[in-house]
Image (tube, rainbow, N blue to C red):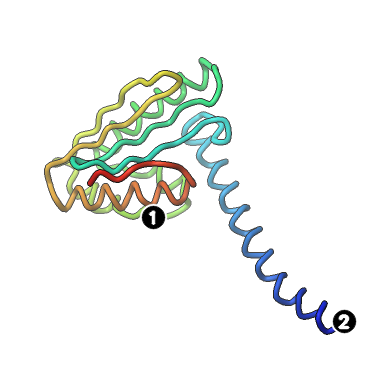
């Protein structure tokens, strides 16, 4: 009995530690996201869509909060301008390191357009390109975001 219990504890402890680490890393990312975006990440929802001509990022507040909606819209206008300059520091900050696709997106910045648009309770960033290499980088960027943010999205590419 003791041997079985000891064996279970040995097996379960690393799994618990991995789960705890993943949750701690996610919570840290959510906190950095709140700093970068000015909105509580747990009270809002992200969506990252890969589309045939690029993609779309949407962020909406989960409640009727005019300050959160204004912060989201300001965030999208700010990152649209930054991304157009090839500046991907904000996603690097939120994810605490390099984000897949951003190196190529920065190199191909003249082939990509970014348009911030208001949505009810939030905003979106529409990303468009006709360049196949840029489209591939955008798809990598959005797939990474979907995984990291544990969010929804679609693939129409």
| Quarter of the view holding residue 49 | top left
- Image vertical order of residue 16 relative to residue 55, above or below: below
Pointer 1 local density, CA inside 10 Å: few below 14, some 14–19, many at least 20: some
| Residue at the limit of the structure toward the front, as seen here | 1
Q: Mark 1: which secondary structure? A: loop
At a point 37% along the width and 40% down the height, the residue shown is: 48
Pointer 2 local density, CA inside 10 Å: few below 14, some 14–19, many at least 20: few
Place of residue 11 in the rendered image (x, y in percent of width and height, measured from the top left): 70, 75
- Give the residue pinned by disc 2: 2
**Contact? badges 2 and 1 (CB < 8 Å):** no
Residues 49 and 93: in front is 49
Residues 121 and 24: in front is 121
Place of residue 116 in the rendered image (x, y in percent of width and height, measured from the top left): 30, 26
| Count of numbered marks | 2
- Give the residue pinned by disc 1: 98
Q: Nearer the viewer, mark 2 or mark 1?
A: 2
Give the side of residue 126 with respect to residue 130, left or right.
right
At a point 28% along the width and 49% down the height, the residue shown is: 139
**Residue 43 marker:** none
Q: CA distance from mark 2 to mark 1?
A: 46 Å
- Image vertical order of residue 47 relative to residue 11, above or below: above
N-terminal of the two: label 2 or label 1?
Answer: 2
Place of residue 39 in the rendered image (x, y in percent of width and height, measured from the top left): 52, 29
Q: Mark 2: which secondary structure? A: helix
Give the side of residue 140 with respect to residue 26, left or right.
left
At a point 27% along the width and 39% down the height, the residue shown is: 55
Give the side of residue 15 with respect to residue 122, left or right.
right
């Amino acid at each position: 009995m003791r041997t079985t219990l000891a064996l279970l504890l040995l097996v379960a402890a690393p799994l618990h530690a991995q789960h705890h680490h993943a949750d701690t890393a996610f919570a840290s990312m959510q906190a950095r996201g709140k700093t970068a975006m000015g909105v509580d990440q747990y009270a809002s929802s992200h969506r990252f869509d890969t589309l045939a001509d690029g993609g779309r990022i949407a962020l909406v507040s989960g409640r009727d909060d005019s300050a959160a909606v204004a912060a989201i819209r300001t965030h999208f206008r700010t990152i649209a301008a930054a991304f157009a300059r090839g500046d991907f520091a904000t996603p690097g900050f939120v994810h605490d390191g390099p984000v897949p696709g951003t190196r190529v997106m920065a190199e191909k910045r003249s082939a990509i357009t970014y348009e911030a648009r208001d949505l009810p309770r939030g905003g979106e960033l529409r990303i468009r390109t006709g360049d196949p290499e840029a489209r591939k980088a955008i798809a990598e960027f959005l797939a990474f975001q979907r995984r990291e943010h544990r969010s929804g999205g679609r693939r129409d590419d």
